[in-house]
Image: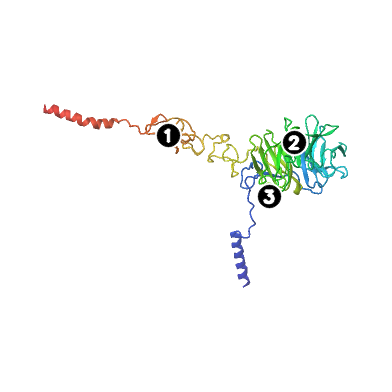
Amino acid sequence: MRKTLIKLFSKTLFLLLLTGIFLPPTAHAICGNAIVEEGESCDLGAPLTFLGSAFPSNSAMLSYPSFLVFDDNGGFYVTGSQSNNIAYVSAEGVLTNFLDLPPALCSIPSGITLDPNGHPCVTCMSTNNVVCDNGDGGAEELVDTSDTLSFPSGLVYDDLGNLYITGSISDNVAVFNGTDLSPFGISDPNLMDRPFSPILNSNGDLFIVSSGDANPAAPKTHTVVSFSDLSIDQLFEPNLSLLVSPAGITLDQTETLMYITGADSDNVVRLDLNDGSLEEVISANPDTNGGLDIPNGIAFGPDGNLYVVSAATHEVLVYLNPNHQGNSDETPNTCRLDCQAPHCGDGIIDSDLGEECDGEINCNDSCQLVGLFCGNSILDSEEECDDGNQDDGDGCSRLCLYENINLPSENANIGGCKLNATAPSSPLSLIYFLAPLALLAFRSRRLS
């Protein structure tokens, strides 16, 4: 009996293993994540694919980061609004505590920039001032803002050394020339409410986030403005279904595309400064955005990738260069959308593989042209037409087949040949026609 049970158990276990019930789950490769996994021969990802965190999250060293700025070494400084410090992340992704900020000197550091000497300077919201690294392991106040603006939120230097500072509660901008702090431009909370993250382009144009009131009943701002000493102009109409409480902005290398974080919509949108169009490029979906939560600062790194501060997860998340040429089923010589290398038979002529064709009627299994040639203006046996090119959309396709547009008339000239033209009589036909006449003439002569 015991042996019978052992045999029965062994057979049952064998069948379970055979059917895969006891087999460990197989990890499936995710095509498009820019990581070559099992079963893939390549994976270039897609523009703005989430790549990972710039450093391992460490809330004890950096808690609730706000904004960041890159230095010339490829690393970046980032403010910790709750840890009340400035942290530094090297180009290799090593996080260190760069400078602790005494709360009496600087409380709730927010915006950050580099002064003309490369030292980080931050806005301190609760203490209403700007504090800079003194280059000697300590911090010192650069300017007290309390008489001109309240709750300073962001700052940026121009090429002349003037420092522009935004006041998130006073809804205004001030400029510090190294000696004096004075109001700059006009103040209109209907156009610019809770300003953050001032940036300058190469022409000296100033752009500022108007973060606005998160109350959907009063969506008067939630936009970005171009700001000067004479005017405030909104770059786009607020759209709370797409962007809520914008916080950080940055420009791409062409300075025609602006990337904007939505602190309350947990996403990133892109504004085309040429046509004013706005689109979401990093969604609020945690399955694809890496867990982005309360995004604030945003900047392009020297590697061309996009770095976004995720305040609630105490991280800076990295997204693949938006100009990156990712997987494609249309571009020659690149990884395909199924994460397989380009190959003969994929319908794309890949010159790097030496292909002359791919899928045409005169193309062999090695993607080389053979025999008949579509596009030579000669109507070959397997062609319906040949108009002298391999273009689609002109009535005769690149495969020399008719397209469903305005078919040619009966006497149209296609590839030097008329359609439905009367074929010339063959010599045999001529013999059949003349033979009876010759016989009739011969009989006539005999009778005469």
Q: Which-is-in-front pick, marks 1 and 3?
A: 3
Could you tell me the amino acid type at mark 2?
Ile
Which quarter of the figure has residue 341?
top right
**Residue shown at the point (63%, 51%) measured from the top left:** 28
CA gap, disc 1 and disc 2: 59 Å
Residue 385, labelled with which disc? 1
**Residue shown at the point (76%, 44%) measured from the top left:** 55
Q: Position of residue 347 (x, y in %)?
A: 53, 39
Look at the numbered discs 1 and 3 and tell me whether their residues touch, using CB distance below 8 Å. Answer: no
- 377 or 63: nearer the viewer: 63
- In the visual, does 316 lie left or right of 403? right
**Residue 228 appears anywhere in the view:** yes
Regarding mark 1 in the picture, which secondary structure is present there?
Answer: loop
- What residue would you read off at disc 3? 286
Q: Which-is-in-front pick, marks 3 and 2?
A: 2
**Residue 92 appears anywhere in the view:** no
Q: Position of residue 68 (x, y in %)?
A: 77, 40
Look at the numbered discs 1 and 2 and tell me whether their residues touch, using CB distance below 8 Å. Answer: no
Please state, as top left, top right, bottom left or bottom right, where the N terminus lies in the image.
Answer: bottom right
Please state, as top left, top right, bottom left or bottom right, where the C terminus lies in the image.
Answer: top left
- In the visual, does 439 lie left or right of 41? left
- 36 or 422: nearer the viewer: 422
- In the visual, does 333 lie left or right of 223? left
- How crowded pointer 3 is (Cα within 10 Å; few <14, some 14-19, many 20+) is rated as few
Q: Which-is-in-front pick, marks 1 and 2?
A: 2
